[in-house]
Every structure is written in C-alpha cells, then in structure tokens.
Image (tube, helix red, strand yellow):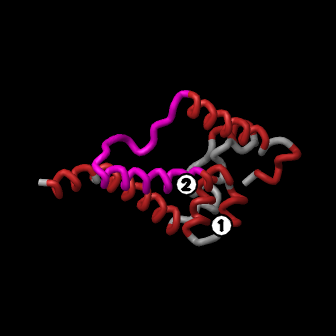
Amino acid sequence: MASVTRRASLRDPAIAGAVGLGAFTLLHFHDPHGSGSYGFCPFLELTGRPCPGCGGLRAINNLTRGDFVGAVSSNVMAVALVGVLAVAWVLWVVRRLRGRDGPMIVLSTRIGIVVLAAFVVFGVVRNLPFGSWLMP
C-alpha cells in the first residue's frame, strides 16, 4: 500500500519532469536560432525591441548543448528561471518522497510581485543603452 501511495504522490512531479524534458529535447533538436523557427514575438514585431522573454528559447537550446555562456548572452533571466525551476522540481520530488503533499512552487503575493518586477526591470534595462549587453 505504501508503494502505491508513494507512486501516486510522484505522479505530478513525474509528469512535470517529462514535460520539461520533452521541451528541452525539442529545443535541442529543433534549433530556434533561425528566424521564424518558432513564430515571432508580438512585442518585438510591434516595437522593434526585445521583451523580457526574447532569446529564451535560444538560451535553452544553448543550455542543452552545454553552451552556458551562449545561453546567458541570449537571455540571462531564462537561464536563471531554468535553474530555479530545476531546484524547485528536485525539492518537490524530495518532499513527495518524504510524504508531504503540495505544489512544486508556492509564491506569496509579495514574492510574486518581486519576481514580476524583476522581469519588468530586466525588460526595460535590456532596451536602454547601458543595458544593451543584455539584448539577445
């Protein structure tokens, strides 16, 4: 009975891990560095400026190829987000193995606002002359 409970408790982390691994696999084999390979960014098309997410797919593609410097130069926020999500997923699995239930990540309103503000600041700074080194 305990193995069934443990197996059931690991279902959600396994699904999330499989989806993440599938996305990484897709981005490894279908290189987003070519123009239009995954569509377009509406913000970039309308303004001519990159949004906070621009370069994220290229960053993950670079990570799957072991090019950390290339990934950071494509989108440092995407690289940080991948790292945070990877750690959160491992901690989620450990919590589930110890019999504790709950979602992968729970953000308080305050932390959610801080994260959102960081993305907005990143998006603004990367479009200013002194932050041009953050452009994809």
Instruction: Tell me how far mark 2 sits from mark 1, CA to CA.
Output: 12 Å
Image quarter where the C terminus lies is bottom right
Q: Is residue 13 above or below residue 111?
A: below
Q: Nearer the viewer, residue 3 or 120?
A: 3
**Quadrant of res 129:** top right
Identity of the amino acid at label 1? Phe
Q: Is residue 69 above or below residue 46?
A: below
Q: In the rendered structure, does residue 82 fall within the stretch colored magenta? A: yes
Which residue bears the numbered disc 1? 68
Which secondary structure dominates the residues rendered in magenta?
Answer: helix
The x, y position of residue 71, in whole percent, is 66, 62
Image quarter where the N terminus lies is bottom left
Residue at image location 57% in from the left, 57% down from the top = 37
Residue that sits furthest to the left in the current view? 1
Residue at image location 52% in from the left, 62% down from the top = 27
The x, y position of residue 15, in whole percent, is 33, 53
- Give the structural element (helix, strand or loop) at label 2: helix
The x, y position of residue 17, in whole percent, is 39, 57
The span shown in magenta is 81-109
Residue that sits furthest to the front in the current view? 98
The x, y position of residue 18, in whole percent, is 37, 58
Residue at image location 30% in from the left, 55% down from the top = 97
Which residue bears the numbered disc 2? 82
Residue that sits furthest to the right in the current view? 129
Q: Is residue 18 above or below residue 108?
A: below
